[in-house]
Amino acid sequence: MPIRHLHLLLLSAVLTLVPSVAAWADEDSGALSFVTQIHQPPPAAAPAQNDDQMAPLLHEVAQDDLWQRIRNGFSLAELDSPLIAKHEQWYANRPDYVSRMTERAGRYLYFILEEVEKRGMPTEVALLPMIESAYNPSAYSIANASGIWQFIPSTGKDYGMKQNWWYDGRRDILSATRGALDYLQRLHDMFGDWQLALAAYNWGEGAVQRAQERNRARGLPTDYASLTMPEETRNYIPKLVAVKNIIASPWNFGLTLSSVPNQPYFTAVTTTEHMDVKVAAKLANISMEEFLALNPAHNRPVMLQHNTNTILLPVDKVDDFYRNLEHNDQPLVSWQGYQTRKGERLDKLAPRFGLTVEKLISINGLSARAKTSSGQTLLVPMRGGDADYEFEAFNMHLAPNALAMVAKTSPRTGKDNKGKTKERGKLAALGNKRERPGKHGTKVASRREAPARSTKLASLSRSAGKPSASRSGKQPARRLHVASNP
């Protein structure tokens, strides 16, 4: 492609921006005349072939930029609300926040946009995690909503997200994204309107239906703008529109977006054995921070294959992981289950495994005030294991078995909660099975081209689980309370 064409493109882009800059300057300082003299309109007789020559270059630039691909798919109905400008100003005043948010989003946006486009949804939906969680995979609200899509436990369960002491599928990038989009599609089918669907995602479909019923009873319209709703929900869509406007033209707000190439960031690798989180990160030659950003669903420092056999790795690290795994001669797991005696003092137990009391409590999600055990099984390092291993479980706000309560049998049946027994069984089994080095049944699963070497591929599942039943009109609201500066 001729360099002169690129120069023409850049010059054209600069001149195109001048009028908006000039208008802004005129409002504040009356400095429009100088800019107007510089920016003269193009000659009316400009050759048509110039546009034809520039079109392929413009198309190529757009195709290489994921932000432009998102802009091209904007299709939500226009919303007239003074709240939009309020949120635009909030983001414009926090450029560091926007920078961190868009940088985090870069890991996930390609996959999410692919899934959005498959469903024929407006691409604004791919920006929804920006207002739900600022694309922070460890975001957790006081309403128990978790992950970048902020699912509450019950809705996560309805859409196939496994939740237990070891693992929280609401934080899993693949299953949570597909579940969120399935849920949003169902809400759109229910209300026939994206504004109402988005309001229901935040507030709950039962709450939106009741608000509509109240308006019908009074002879009032039942569209989004006519409903009475909580302040949080009233601000929800204006906030999304504000983010959309910033993505559409960040320069108008004095902001810069982190570059996001229009290509996959991660690939899914399937494993058939338990593995330490730290070991997996080391095999892939990536930091723990990067590994946990892509695999935030694991609540403990060891990943059980029973919960998921898929881990996400940067596309350029899959070969490293595969090669290092083939040559690995060290155990994949360095943790074991230890059956405590009821009343056993934690300050006596922790040093036996090279741990501080604080680290023992952190790893096992115990109460910070815990002094003695209740006879439960605890996760501790094996002999020779890495006692200095730094890992902070994502569900520190929960008791060890609180996640298992999602699947608890109804008290009316008189049956015990089998979830605890099952999880303790996994923990005990982990202590009895020390992973042996050698052949590790690991396969690479990619939605793109296969690696150069001959290896068996496993395709990613396309389903996130079906809702177990239709929701009643009394569904609890999905209240979001994320820290203002994730």
Image: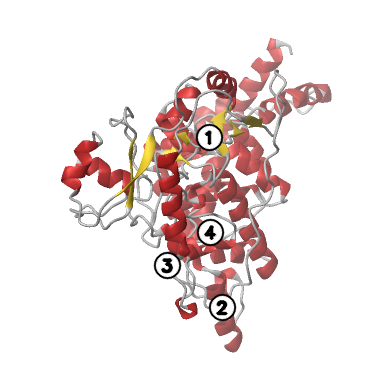
Please state which amino acid type lies under the numbered disc 4: Gly
Q: In this view, does 468 lie above or below 181?
A: below
Considering only order in the chain, which callout, 2 or 1, is on the residue closer to the N terminus?
1
Please state which amino acid type lies under the numbered disc 2: Gly
Q: How far apart are marks 1 and 4 (CA)?
A: 22 Å
Mark 4 packing: few (<14 Cα in 10 Å), some, or many (20+)?
many
Q: Which of marks 3 and 1 is in front?
A: 1
Instruction: Give residue 479's quadrant in the image.
Output: bottom left
Question: According to the image, label 4 marks what residue?
Answer: 156
Answer with left or right where residue 198 lies relative to residue 451.
left
Q: Which residue is drawn at 20% across and 52% down?
A: 344
Q: Which of marks 3 and 2 is in front?
A: 2
* Along the line of sight, the residue nearer the viewer: 392 or 222: 392
Q: Distance between the residues labelled 3 and 4?
A: 25 Å
Q: Where is residue 367 in the image (x, y as percent from the top left)?
A: 25, 55
- Quarter holding the N terminus is top right
Q: How far apart are marks 1 and 2 (CA)?
A: 36 Å
Rendered image: mark on residue 107: 1
Question: According to the image, label 2 marks what residue?
Answer: 473
Question: According to the image, label 3 marks what residue?
Answer: 231
Answer with left or right where residue 212 lies relative to residue 101.
right
Q: What element carries label 1?
A: loop
Q: Which residue is drawn at 53% across and 35% down?
A: 107
Q: Distance between the residues labelled 3 and 1?
A: 31 Å
